[in-house]
Image: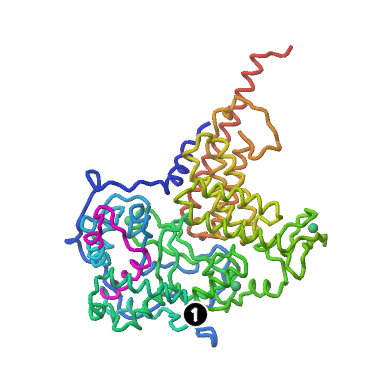
Amino acid sequence: MSFRGLRAFREKKQAKSLVVVPASSGSVNDDTPSDLPPPPPEKPGFRYDLPASMELKVVPGKGRAIFSTVSSKPGSALFFHRPRVVILSTPNIPRYCSYCCAELVTKRCSACRTVWYCDLACQKWDWALHQSECECLKRVRTLSSDQENPSIPPDAVRCLARISFAKVKYGLNSGTAKELDSLHSLKGALSQSAQTSHAQLAHALVQYLGAEAPTDLKKYGICSAGDLVDLISKFSTNTHTLTTPNLTQIGLAVSPALSLFNHSCEPNAVLVFPGSPRGDKSSPSMQLVCIRDINPGDEIVISYVDTTLPYDRRRAQLKDAYGFDCVCPLCQRSENQLHVDPRAATYCPARCGGIAFLPTPDKPYVECTTCKKRAPTEAEAIGDALRIGQEALDKVTALQDSDPAYAAKIAANIISLLTSAGMTNGSHPLLGLLRSHHYLLTTSLPLSEDHQKLLDDTIRTAVRVLQGLLEVLPFGHPIRAVHFSELGMLCATDETASNIPGRSQPTNEKVFPPTGAARLQLAINYLIEARKELLIAFGIKMEGGDVGKKVRETLIQLEAEMGIWKEGVKTAWKEQVADHPKR
Ligand SMILES: [Zn+2]
Ligand SMILES: [Zn+2]
Ligand SMILES: [Zn+2]
Ligand SMILES: [Zn+2]
């Protein structure tokens, strides 16, 4: 049986982290866009582009908030928007188009020899902002000790520069500039660590812009040190993570209109980049999608942090980066211990399927909230496991690109430690370690010698990640939806020759994942679930985004394969009967 198409798809995806930077010679099409037509004109006036179904209000004690004037069901697209500025993180510059963020690049700017585009059209549209950026990047190259591989400033610095270029390009009194200036600033309410990092950013930005005297910054509307701090503060609290349609994080996006939505750890909407329709040459589109029922008058809220994290970590991140104490329903339930949050829980000691609060020094036992079975546990031991788990997760995250084999080893060891301590798959830091381990196994698949064993290990880890995600995220959450599709694709990946039809092998129902037709059926089941969730996560109108469309195509292909498989088994069976006629 052949799943060549699927394998190619998976390999392309897996190869992402191994992509080699294209050489600067011959096949590369370098172009200077100096004589290209100007970009589209800027619309006059300042507006937020909000749809009629939304209302901007100022709530006393809370500030700006967006309310819905209509009812919306999960999967409905609430707001389609193109960010004002997008920037790729440094390792992604040679991999993605700097304008539309598509993955196939063919052209590099011949002047700075740094940014890449998928074609001339993208290069042309991007020139409006890249023109000034190009000068900065050329200067970085000239000043670098290694001119072939200069160290490009981080995405935050390049993003701030692009915001400044946009203001100059359209004029300091233009709608774009006013919209960017309208971003909320935390200046004055910053933590010490934020203040230090902002000072470093300010220094790097001034250097990147090539400003030698404070007056050089006037053209960007920066007339004092206070203005500079303000710009950086606005930037820090108002950027969104730029992702591919399958949620790979590739850079930063700035959209003042989308920054108006407030935070909740239990959001009723999500921001995604579902992918653009074919041939649509534009900056990537952001889509706000409803994932929980919204009624007229409800505030539309998104999450600023990873909602798989437990109460204390979410709150610490929100306080540090955004300066507020979250009072969302999930945080309130956790604070008042009204329910066991699976993000911080252990399984029932009697394995009834229920979960229990983590033990504390006051309550040094685990009591199942379902069957009420109580087991004494050293609160200290659980505390140690959590601390070791967190240290391991930090280490794995830091090492996953530089030393993936070592990172995978740490992850595997600490996962078994936390599992034997009774932690739930959805609990932190176990879920984080499982997700990292899954990523590391997936990226090592094309390199492995014992492919079949590693593939099966990867599927088993992916299933545990899924169990964890199902515990902590609602139906139709993008992370859940994309993970379902990844698991389905993994199960659909080619097995080794021993599993081809006609060559029967002993079947053991207890072995997971199964082989042959059962595995193919498993892939189909996961992909059917993936499709249902993707239609919510990325919007029904968008057909579940690029991932949703891919899953649909794969399902059609797999169902055809399933038919061939059944035919193959029938033929093999007939041949076997013919070879060994009944005695
Ligand atoms: Zn492009
Ligand atoms: Zn350039
Ligand atoms: Zn909260
Ligand atoms: Zn129980």
Magenta stretch: includes residue 152 = yes
Task: Name the dominant secondary structure of the magenta segment.
Answer: helix
Image quadrant assignment for residue 45: bottom left
Q: Is mark 1 within 8 Å of ligand 3?
A: no
> Dividing the image into four equal quarters, which quarter contains ligand 2?
bottom left
Image quadrant assignment for residue 208: bottom left
Image quadrant assignment for residue 340: bottom right
Q: Answer few, some or many: residues within 10 Å of disc 1's Cα (few below 14, many 20 plus, some between 14 and 19).
A: some
Above or below — where is 273 with respect to 409?
below
Residue 305 vs residue 10, the one in the foreground: 305
Magenta stretch: includes residue 88 = no
- Give the amino acid type for the residue marked by disc 1 in the picture: Glu
Q: Secondary structure at mark 1?
A: strand
Magenta residue span = 140-168
Instruction: Give coordinates of residue 209: x percent, y percent.
Output: 27, 70
Query: Across the whole image, how many numbered discs are drawn on residues?
Result: 1
Above or below — where is 383 with respect to 236?
above
Above or below — where is 314 with respect to 459?
below
Residue 415 vs residue 477, the one in the foreground: 415
Tell me which residue sits at (58%, 34%) in the image: 563
Residue 429 vs residue 33, the one in the foreground: 429
Instruction: Give coordinates of residue 188: x percent, y percent.
Output: 45, 84
From the image, tell me which residue sits under label 1.
55
Tell me which residue sits at (64%, 37%) in the image: 514
Instruction: Give coordinates of residue 389: x percent, y percent.
Output: 61, 57
Quick check: 142 left or right of 354? Answer: left
Quick check: 491 left or right of 242? Answer: right
Name the image quarter holding the C terminus. top right
Which residue in the rendered view is the most extreme toward the left?
35
Tell me which residue sits at (51%, 44%) in the image: 554
